[in-house]
Image (tube, rainbow, N blue to C red):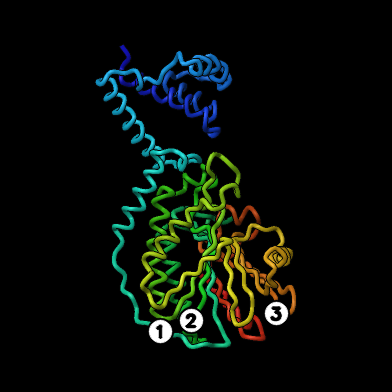
Amino acid sequence: MVDIEQAEFLSRQFDLLLARLDDPAIEWQDIADLRSEYTGENEHRDTIRKGSKLFYEYLQAGWIKNPEESSTTATSKVTNQLRELKKERTKLQTEKLELNRWLRENARDELIVEHICQAINELKPLSIPEAIHAEPSDRAGILVFGDEHYGTEFEIRGLGNEIINAYSPEIFESRMWNLLEQAVGIIRKEGFSKIYVYSMGDFEDGLLRVKQLMQLRYGVVEGTVRYADFITNWLNELTKYVEVEFQMTNGNHTELRMLGQPKGTFTKENMGLVVDAMISTHLANNPNFTFVKNPTGYIYSNIVGFNVMGIHGEVKNMEQAIKDFSHIYNVQLDFLIAGHKHHACSETVGINKEVVNVPSIIGVDDYSISIHRTSNAGATFLVLEAGKGKTIEYAIKL
């Protein structure tokens, strides 16, 4: 008689073999790994591939039936229980690792929905500020930040074993409140009643490499929800001092690499959509907050007569990029702003035209060291004037 453990294994193996007929994401190695886990022996994918040929021939001839179709009522109940157990185990595995194909499987879809619904239900009411009613001006401020990589934890040490940079969710929050304090000081100094706020992407870490998952305190879904809750409260606090027109662009770390595909394959499948939804929902009644969403996924504004575009920053040459984007979208861009490199740098590329790379909230990490582009954790506050372009650039160090 087949025991429960063996029945579960056979059921999972049968499901994988059937699913592979329609889903190319399921590889022979997946089935080999399942068998190795059960038998304790190293199973080669080629052995599985060759052996499955006979299985598929009998299946197509109708000689093999799904166990559920021919089972008794009692057996069906056991099978259903096994399937529920399997889904719960899959969800638990996703919570721990959340690897490439988690969005494609039913149990993992349910996990995302559970997390997001729970987070929305647990949101605390915000204290909505009074309307500010900003007056038109020929000067404007742009607060730019990004590359928060929320959830990761590490220490970077120097030649003398001193700590160059340390990071954690607590340090992230501390830096963001420091940023708000410094930004409010600039807003008051410059006399702004309205500013533009750009979030440049990569708010979270961990969707690119398994190594990054090991540095995360939270799973990817939980981390996204926690970040969304924090940034919503942070933006709401900022609107107590100034009107905010907010835009965000997606980063490469938050793009879902489904089916094991390379970056850029599913550009619209991004955890930034969760943050987008939570900000939009929770700040919908804030009179001092406007969320602008560009259909391209980039940031774009016309500010005191200048066309400003924001991208995450995965381009080799910013000067060429501003020309390319101007040509692609048939708009003469005056400013191109980017994050990604974790390094602050501005360059004039024409009359009242500049490309601007902003620093990161995370600061020095293994990535920035690897590309030799280290800089302090920070953000950038730009001041534009009609007819003059950028007149002031505040480098905010955190």
Residue receiving disc 3: 352
Instruction: Give the alpha-carbon distance from disc 1 to disc 2, as whole Å.
Output: 9 Å
Residue receiving disc 2: 194
User: Tag 1: residue type?
Assistant: Ile
Instruction: Give the alpha-carbon distance from disc 3 to disc 2, as whole Å.
Output: 22 Å
Q: Are marks 1 and 2 in contact (CB under 8 Å)?
A: yes
User: Tag 2: residue type?
Assistant: Lys
Which residue is more in the foreground, 110 or 240?
110
* Residue at image point 31% right, 73% down: 127
**Residue 200 coordinates in the image, percent (x, y):** 55, 64
Q: Nearer the viewer, mark 1 or mark 3?
A: 1
Q: Quadrant of the N terminus?
A: top left
| N-term-proximal mark, 3 vs 2 | 2
Judged from the image, the secondary structure of the residue bearing numbered disc 2 is: strand
Judged from the image, the secondary structure of the residue bearing numbered disc 3 is: loop
**Number of residues whose C-alpha sits closer than 10 Å to that of mark 2, classed few (under 14), some (14–19) or many (20 or more):** many
Residue most toward the left?
Answer: 74
Residue receiving disc 1: 132
Residue 96 found in image quarter: top left
* Residue at image point 57% right, 74% down: 395
Instruction: Give the alpha-carbon distance from disc 1 to disc 3, as whole Å.
Output: 31 Å
Q: Is residue 94 above or below residue 155?
A: above
